[in-house]
């Protein structure tokens, strides 16, 4: 692919696909033309991959997820095709700037946070490895809301990525399935017949996902909902315009919006419909594909692996059984065995508020046949395990428990980090584990190094290639080759020069967008993730206040300059998280405008943290805050991105932090806080918070400042709720971990002052993160769960 070819293709698409004259084309037009030209290059490997999988009758993996947090696509595609430099040069000839066009692309924000981004990394890794795979999800018209701050408060506005043309999708109107809801079930000749009361159509939209070096491409198939009944012309002609459009409105509601809750469960009927809509469309599509080349479904589990990304797609199990039994006349027991052979279930949380449960009434109303099948699954399990405790039943207390359903329907259940998988075994599914030893396994999460290093941090990526040679992007263990250079002053200078340049770029951006000046020589201390009590952004901001207070008490003192960077959204209905956001913004306003503080402390909180912002902030971080209450963060993946990009972690022994610390070395990680067991013990002391606060003058002062309204003079009682909860309902043990957190922060300061030591530690973090490539995670799944092989 030469520069001339690509230039001509871009011009061709600008003219014939976008319909614009170069003289009048906007950045948007040029970006579309570039996208189409790159997309053309994916189509060949995409077809070739499908043909090969088909011809060799390979086992295929279907990854079902309600979220795919893809982010931008153009640059990622260019990089994986090896065409980034060519595209840059071709565009330059046309008077266009590649980076500006890449920046023009809206994020595909079809996810909330970690779980959705993980699904996107896994799609990319499957394509890189050549694992024949399909992603199934929903084509939400509105992805995750946009976040703005108004007087420091989070305000949500709708996200509308699809108001622009989406050049990466292929519409497949011919690939459509009917999805039923409600109605009733009758018996006809001894067979159950479900007559749905409502139906919608699931219509497919395909996105090719190309792997590193364009050797393989898989499909991400997203379903859009359409009405089954056409527009009611008769009603329209009678003048009843709203009623005429009613079926359409009803149907489209299903794929209208992404639920903005991360790790909380809401129990809304529309959400249940969305989950079934996706699961049913996926299963119908899987069976249709399979039956194109096989006689019947008896060997399905030898050719098909279906992964449930959390319980959200769990209805795939009952739906698969329903289709095998009701439509393909299979015996229930056989259908159950085959379904279990196909299904794997990934658990992503132990938080009780995140575990999905549906009232039997709602399930029975919305999906009457599935409710029967769920009861049959439960009964079959009870029969097979006559001594099973009542607490493992799927249906109990008038609720359907989706965790138990997923566990029982799957042949493998996995947690997402070693610590989390251990806790899944010893707590959440303790009794089921005893009945099914060996079913629970661990697959530690991973991240794709193509997006999170090659794309996000080209300076560091180039330095790595110059130092250890090309090819580490697809074999991340090779980063180990950097280790000997951690003692080479010349290398460390270059390593830190890259970091400095990334920080300078962020500081320019912060100054342009937020009007806050930050020095690139200060330590960039970054906490970016969803706002949640268990992630303890509150502990970070309280420590920030303590630091401000220290400087105020000793204005002539020496302090290591820090920029506290926060990023993240709260669920719209999560009041406590929204108070924390407000507090961070109030603290930022006071601290940043305090002339006595100067460069020694700044707080920045750019609104609307998303994948593209992560790509900017992560390469500029010196310190990575991974400070969740131990036992609460299942894995974390931001922790991996930051460490890979040379940030040192201050963190608790939670989720994948444990394994990161083992890999990078305890001496290159700032550990603090209670362990998961200590957390459980500590909570038994009802006075834990009061005792911790009374023993810590700095924390007491901070709470006093908050109580006095020092950060909200216009409304002095604004943070009384936070102060009160700190004293009396500190469920996530902020107070109990605070002193040790401060101790660790002081160690961070000391290490940062020793520039050489810091550089060495940072470089060793990058060098030792190979294990956390999502390629390794996908290989683990292929071997331990899916029984699938690479087709490359
Ligand atoms: O999944 C990530 C983990 C992270 C965990 C997150 C998650 C969601 O984003 C949403 C729902 C849910 O149950 C869990 O909180 O720790 O890294 C990917 O496994």
Image (cartoon, rainbow, N blue to C red):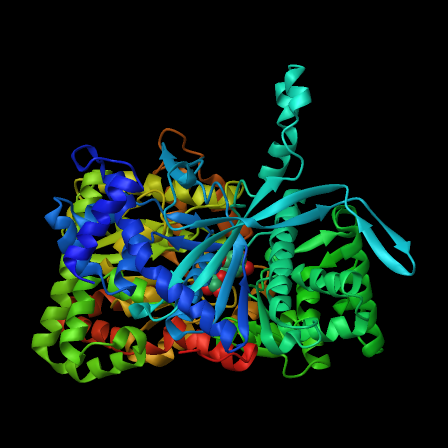
Q: Position of residue 278 (x, y in %)?
A: 60, 53
Q: Decide: is 264 above or below 320.
A: above
Residue farthest to the right, as pictured: 189
Q: Quadrant of residue 347?
A: bottom right
For this view, does 685 lie left or right of residue 148? Answer: right
- Judged left or right of residue 585, residue 193 is right
| 481 and 787: which is toward the camera | 787
Percent x, y for residue 202? Answer: 60, 48
Tell which residue pokes out farthest to the left in this image: 490
Give the residue at x 66% y 66%: 406
Instruction: Please tell me whether residue 499 is drawn above or below residue 505 in the rendered image.
Output: below
Of 556 and 44, nearer the camera is 44
| Quadrant in the rendering for residue 268 | top right
Question: Which image quarter is the N terminus in?
Answer: bottom left
Location of the C terminus (image quadrant): bottom left
Which residue is rendered at x = 34% and y = 71% of the image?
215
| Residue 337 sits in quarter | bottom right
* Residue 612 seen: yes
Res. 152 visible in picture: no
Q: Is residue 228 left or right of residue 569?
A: right
Residue 369 location (% of width, % of height): 79, 54
At 70% from the left edge and 80% from the top edge, which residue is drawn? 436
Foreground of the two, 418 or 102: 102
Residue 453 or residue 474, whichever sits in front: 474
The structure residue drawn at horizontal position 42% and vertical position 48%, both measured from the top left corner, is 109
Residue 252: where, in percent of width, then height?
58, 38
Relative to 784, does residue 164 appear above or below in the rendering?
above
């Amino acid at each position: 692919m030469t520069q001339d070819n690509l230039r001509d293709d871009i011009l061709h698409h600008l003219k014939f696909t976008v319909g614009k004259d170069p003289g009048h084309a906007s950045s948007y037009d040029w970006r579309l033309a570039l996208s189409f030209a790159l997309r053309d290059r994916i189509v060949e490997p995409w077809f070739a991959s499908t043909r090969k999988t088909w011809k060799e009758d390979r086992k295929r993996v279907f990854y079902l997820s309600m979220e795919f947090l893809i982010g931008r696509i153009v640059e990622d595609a260019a990089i994986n095709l090896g065409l980034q430099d060519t595209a840059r040069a071709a565009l330059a000839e046309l008077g266009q700037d590649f980076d500006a066009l890449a920046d023009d692309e809206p994020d595909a924000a079809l996810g909330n946070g970690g779980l959705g981004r993980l699904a996107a990394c896994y799609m990319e890794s499957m394509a890189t490895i050549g694992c024949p795979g399909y992603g199934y999800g929903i084509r939400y018209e509105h992805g995750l809301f946009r976040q703005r701050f108004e007087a420091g408060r989070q305000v949500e506005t709708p996200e509308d990525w699809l108001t622009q043309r989406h050049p990466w999708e292929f519409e497949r109107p011919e690939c459509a399935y009917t999805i039923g809801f409600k109605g009733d079930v009758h018996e006809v000749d001894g067979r159950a017949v479900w007559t749905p009361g409502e139906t919608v159509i699931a219509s497919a939209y395909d996105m090719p996902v190309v792997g590193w070096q364009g050797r393989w491409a898989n499909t991400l198939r997203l379903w859009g909902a359409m009405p089954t009944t056409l527009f009611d012309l008769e009603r329209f002609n009678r003048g009843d315009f709203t009623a005429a459009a009613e079926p359409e409105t009803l149907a489209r509601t299903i794929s209208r919006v992404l639920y903005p809750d991360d790790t909380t469960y809401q129990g809304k009927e529309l959400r249940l419909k969305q989950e079934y809509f996706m699961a049913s469309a996926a299963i119908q599509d899987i069976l249709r594909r399979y039956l194109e080349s096989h006689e019947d479904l008896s060997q399905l589990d030898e050719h098909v692996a279906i992964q449930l990304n959390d319980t959200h797609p769990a209805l795939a199990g009952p739906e698969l059984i329903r289709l095998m039994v009701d439509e393909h006349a299979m015996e229930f027991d056989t259908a159950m065995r085959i379904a279990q052979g196909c299904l794997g279930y990934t658990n992503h949380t132990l938080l009780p508020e995140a575990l999905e449960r549906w009232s039997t009434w709602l399930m029975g109303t919305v999906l009457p046949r599935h409710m029967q099948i769920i009861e049959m699954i439960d009964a079959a399990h009870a029969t097979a395990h006559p001594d099973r405790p009542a607490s493992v039943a799927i249906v109990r207390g008038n609720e359907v428990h989706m965790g138990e359903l997923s566990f029982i329907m799957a042949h493998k259940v996995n947690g997402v980090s070693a610590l989390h998988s251990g806790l899944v075994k010893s707590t959440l599914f303790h009794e089921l584990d005893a009945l099914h030893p060996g079913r629970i396994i661990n697959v530690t999460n991973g991240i794709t190094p193509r997006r999170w290093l090659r794309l996000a941090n080209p300076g560091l990526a180039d330095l790595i290639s110059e130092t250890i040679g090309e090819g580490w992007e697809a074999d991340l263990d090779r980063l180990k080759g950097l280790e000997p250079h951690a003692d080479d002053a010349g290398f460390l200078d270059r390593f830190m020069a890259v970091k400095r340049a990334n920080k300078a770029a962020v500081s320019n951006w912060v100054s342009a967008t937020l009007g806050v000046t930050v020095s690139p020589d200060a330590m960039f201390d970054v906490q970016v993730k969803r706002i949640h009590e268990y992630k303890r952004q509150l502990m970070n901001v309280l420590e920030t206040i303590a630091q401000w207070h220290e400087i105020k008490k000793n204005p002539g003192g020496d302090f290591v300059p820090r920029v506290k960077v926060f990023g993240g959204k709260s669920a719209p209905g999560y009041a406590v998280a929204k108070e924390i956001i407000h507090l961070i913004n109030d603290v930022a306003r006071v601290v940043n405008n305090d002339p006595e503080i100067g460069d020694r402390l700044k707080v920045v909180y750019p609104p609307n943290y998303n994948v593209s912002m992560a790509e900017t902030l992560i390469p500029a971080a010196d310190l990575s805050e991974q400070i969740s209450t131990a036992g609460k963060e299942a894995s974390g993946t931001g922790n991996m991105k930051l460490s890979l990009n040379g940030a040192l972690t201050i963190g608790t022994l939670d989720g994948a932090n444990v394994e990161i610390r083992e890999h990078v070395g305890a001496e290159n990680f700032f550990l603090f806080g209670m362990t998961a067991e200590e957390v459980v013990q500590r909570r038994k002391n009802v006075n834990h918070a009061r005792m911790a606060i009374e023993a810590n003058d700095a924390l007491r002062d901070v709470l006093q400042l908050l109580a006095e309204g020092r950060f909200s003079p216009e409304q002095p009682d604004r943070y009384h709720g936070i102060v009160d909860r700190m004293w009396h309902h500190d469920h996530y043990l902020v107070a109990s971990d605070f002193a040790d957190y401060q101790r660790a922060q002081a160690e961070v300061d000391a290490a940062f002052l020793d520039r050489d030591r810091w550089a060495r530690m940072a470089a060793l973090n990058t060098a030792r993160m190979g294990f956390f490539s999502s390629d390794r995670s996908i290989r683990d799944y292929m071997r331990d769960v899916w029984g699938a092989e690479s087709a490359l």
